[in-house]
Amino acid sequence: MHNLQIGPSKLQSSRLAYGCWRLAGAGNAREAGQEQLDAGERAVLAAYEAGFTLFDHADVYCDGVAEEIFGRALRKVEGMRERIIIANKCGIRMANELAGAPYRYDFSADYIVDSCERSLHRLRVETIDIYQLHRPDWLADWEEVAEAFTRLREQGKVREFGVSNFRPSQVTALQSELSAPLVVNQIEISLANLNAFEDGTLDQCQTNRITPLAWSPLAAGALVGVAGDTKTNVALSTALDGSARERGVSRSVIALAWLLRHPAKIVPIVGSTDPDRIRDAASAASVELPREEWYALLEAARGTRLP
């Protein structure tokens, strides 16, 4: 799989990332059996063998169990840690973590630092390559966030920083307090969600050399088997199937290749735990869609021609 530079950093990543949020399954992760934990390890190793070198985490994924599974998988392949990028996120706090507290976001400096240290322990590594704020905290003090970032960098616990689900104005506000550039913004982007193309997010990414990490690039599987109950879905299904049939690949590959074609250098995050689907997704890096075909898929996704 081809590599690309992450933002203005020295980090080099595969063109697609592997998302670890389902490694312990969709149920209560703390009750996952050994079979489920082993399946999670196999998924990580399958992604690595398929050429994925950027692995996406968050401290809330599977209640921390996803990080623990990854840490175990990392120990099974000599030299793997030196060849990959670990991206992680913090800032989401669960309901009743403190008595009577609601589900909420927290960018206080101490919480950011403490979250990072807990993730390092679960992952069994000394440094996180890219550390991101997960969802914007409405009470965020950007100067305080900058203080936390500085502490983590100076302690050698984090190499680069980024954000997730941030509007362009929020990226600008945080960046104004930082001495080093943010390198990623992880946002929902797919043929089923075109907001980033229209709200200035991808424009800002290109201008500031921020790498967009696309979560749910297959719209939680909807693009793998688009329902035929609306005119838009019928058109998109037909367009995806036509492109896939012409190349002898799956519909998933075309949907991922559509994102890879954008000049902002979008990195789709693949979240399947099925080794066959992981390997299939990796082949999207070898598919380049011509401009006309890219726009035909866009028109099908929009359900109407461009103005």
Image (tube, rainbow, N blue to C red):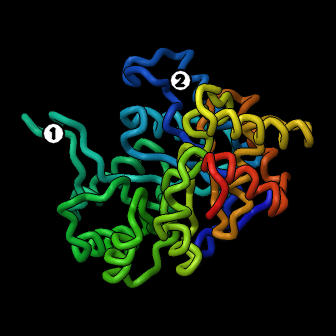
Q: Position of residue 76 (x, y in %)?
A: 65, 37
Residue of label 2: 37
Position above or below: 307 against 119: below
Position above or below: 78 against 162: above
Q: What amino acid type should be assigned to the residue bearing mark 2?
A: Leu
Task: Say if mark 2 contacts mark 1, CB within 8 Å.
Answer: no
User: How many residues crowd mark 2 within 10 Å: few (<14), some (14–19), many (20+)?
Assistant: many
Which quadrant holds residue 59?
Answer: top left
Q: Nearer the viewer, mark 2 or mark 1?
A: 1
Residue of label 1: 102
Q: Residue at x 27, y 54 (%)?
A: 114
Please tell me whether mark 2 sits on a helix, a strand or a loop.
Answer: helix
Depth check, front residue: 69 or 267: 267
Q: Residue at x 42, y 38 (%)?
A: 61
> In the rendered image, is residue 212 in sight?
yes
Which quadrant holds residue 47?
Answer: top right
